[in-house]
Image: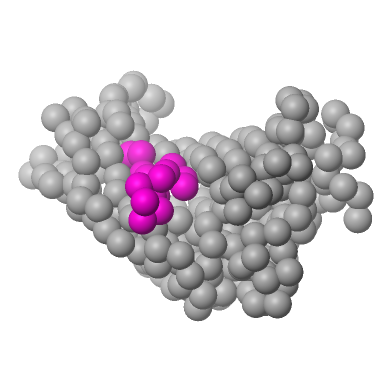
Amino acid sequence: MLEEHIGKYSNKVKNTVERGAVKKFAEAIGDPHPIYLDEETGKKSRYKNNIAPPTFPRVFDYGVIEGLKLPSKGLIHGEQTFHYERPLLVGEEILCYSKVENYYEKKGKHGELGFLVVKSFGEDPSGQIIFTSKQTVIITEAVRKEMIV
Amino acid sequence: MKKIAELKIGEALEDVQLNPVSRLDLIKYAGASGDYNPIHTIDEEAKKAGLPGIIAHGMWTMGNLSKLFTSYYEEGFIQDYSIRFKGMVFLNDVITLKATLEEKMGNQLRFNVLAVNQKGNEVLKGEVLFKTFTGTDITHIF
């Protein structure tokens, strides 16, 4: 039922790797390391800057994929990957967008499950890809039924 | 601290055991990540969803696990991080984070990573590909 969205892209949204957001995020994952938080440590590092934790892109706005409406409840996060060309630097601007990579259904113990694979991209202002991520969301039969109604 | 590049196949980074999962941990993560799905913070909503109680965000556990690698930032960075969420994490669960070096390919180190609960059940499992800098890389990337 979500097959029709495969291949669709969202609009691109400009995000900033905000210092305050990185601090809050690093603390929330129990990793308040100076390479994320302390300016001096960042300057002295090979990155010449503070960096962001690898799962930080969760925070970004990836725009809207037109027509793709997912319920706010009942989704199960099945898998998650991140790929980096280099760590994200605090203060830099990243253009983010997503794409519906795949959708398929499989029979499971609890009825037919839907698997939605969304790939996300983060580019620097020159268009160079800095990171990609892939999220697999599992949609149970019960939730799908509500979506049709 | 030993250099990450000096690890031998089969050697592990030091395990990290988290404090028992608290509601405040999850409220903080919701705020920091923007993921306000109420099954992570509100008991009634979790129960409505058929859960015995609130559960941690999968991404909270995945975020925690990456800290095994943070202090090696001068040697390299996490190039690939892939996780399968295998089990739910409940309030008061005690999670232990593990990483074992599986393979060395040039300047890439492949680790098996794992989070287990106090019963020894896997809640999250996957891989980290850690890329170490070579002499030329440093100026090339930064």
Q: Depth check: give the residue in front, B42 or B14.
A: B14
Which residue extends farthest left?
A149
| Residue A140 showing in the rendered view | no
Magenta segment includes A119: yes
Q: Is residue A50 above or below residue B63?
A: below
Position of residue B4 measured from the top left corner of the image (x, y, whole percent) = 83, 44
State the image quarter where residue B90 is shown.
bottom right
Magenta segment includes B100: no
Position of residue B34 measured from the top left corner of the image (x, y, whole percent) = 39, 66
Q: Depth check: give the residue in front, A73 or A53.
A: A53
Position of residue B99 measured from the top left corner of the image (x, y, whole percent) = 75, 42
- Name the residue rendered at 77%, 49% in the picture: B75
State the image quarter where residue A36 is shown.
bottom right
- Name the residue rendered at 27%, 58% in the picture: A13
What segment carries the magenta color?
A118-132
Position of residue A111 measured from the top left corner of the image (x, y, whole percent) = 31, 28
* Majority SS type along the magenta span: strand
Q: Is residue A144 above or below residue A6?
A: below
B41 sits to left or right of B131: left
Q: Depth check: give the residue in front, A80 or B115.
A: A80
Quadrant location of the N terminus of chain A in the rendered image: top left
Quadrant location of the C terminus of chain A in the rendered image: top left
- Name the residue rendered at 54%, 62% in the picture: A89
